[in-house]
């Protein structure tokens, strides 16, 4: 795939259509995802962007978590999206280190609504 990102890698499986894991690295001007917003704010921003995508009928935030390791803040956001291209379940983890934004996203085609597979409930930091 072509991308405007600094670096992008996407891996998909032939055994389960619609399953993909991707890593994107982009240069940024901030030092932490916390500077971009709280976990709650970033979750809302992700949902806003997802809902604005072409063909998306609905998107539902399923859960969020915040972690910190060696001074790096990690936000994980889990959500489902219903679109004209099918229903998908996403888990994305974002972090910033050395002014580079790292986003790891896993997606899988349709799970039953409300069945979160990674984060059991919405959690506030």
Image (spheres, grey):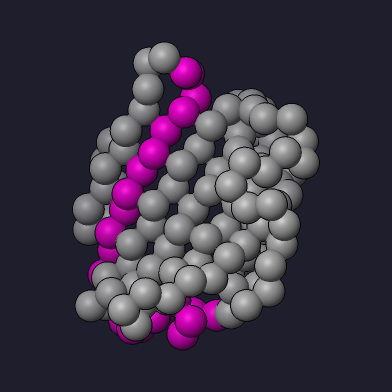
Image height of 17 relative to 45, above or below:
above
Residue 43 in the image: x percent, y percent? 62, 65
Q: Quadrant of residue 77?
A: bottom right
Residue at the spot 26% in from the left edge and 48% down from the top edge: 8
Q: Which residues are magenta?
A: 16-37
* Left or right of residue 39: residue 71: left
Residue 92 in the image: x percent, y percent? 49, 53
Q: Is-magenta flag for residue 107?
A: no
Query: Residue lying farthest right?
Result: 114
Q: Is residue 4 visible?
A: no
Residue 73 in the image: x percent, y percent? 42, 76
* Left or right of residue 15: residue 82: right
Q: Quadrant of the N terminus?
A: top left
Q: Is residue 84 visible?
A: yes
Residue 48 in the image: x percent, y percent? 65, 60
Residue at the spot 69% in from the left edge and 67% down from the top edge: 123
* Left or right of residue 100: residue 50: right
Foreground residue, 3 or 25? 25
Image height of 52 relative to 87, above or below:
below
Residue at the spot 58% in from the left edge and 27% down from the top edge: 109
Q: Is-magenta flag for residue 24?
A: yes
Q: Quadrant of residue 61?
A: bottom right
Image height of 15 relative to 36, above or below:
above
Residue at the spot 39% in from the left edge and 39% down from the top edge: 21
């Amino acid at each position: 795939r072509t991308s405007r990102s600094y670096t992008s890698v996407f891996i998909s499986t032939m055994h389960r259509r619609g399953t993909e894991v991707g890593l994107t690295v982009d240069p940024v001007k901030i030092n932490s995802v916390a500077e971009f917003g709280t976990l709650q704010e970033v979750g809302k921003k992700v949902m806003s962007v997802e809902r604005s995508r072409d063909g998306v009928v609905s998107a539902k935030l399923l859960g969020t978590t915040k972690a910190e390791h060696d001074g790096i803040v990690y936000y994980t956001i889990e959500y489902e999206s219903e679109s004209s291209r099918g229903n998908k379940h996403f888990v994305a983890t974002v972090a910033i280190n050395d002014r580079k934004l790292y986003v790891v996203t896993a997606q899988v085609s349709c799970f039953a609504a409300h069945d979160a597979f990674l984060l059991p409930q919405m959690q506030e930091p």
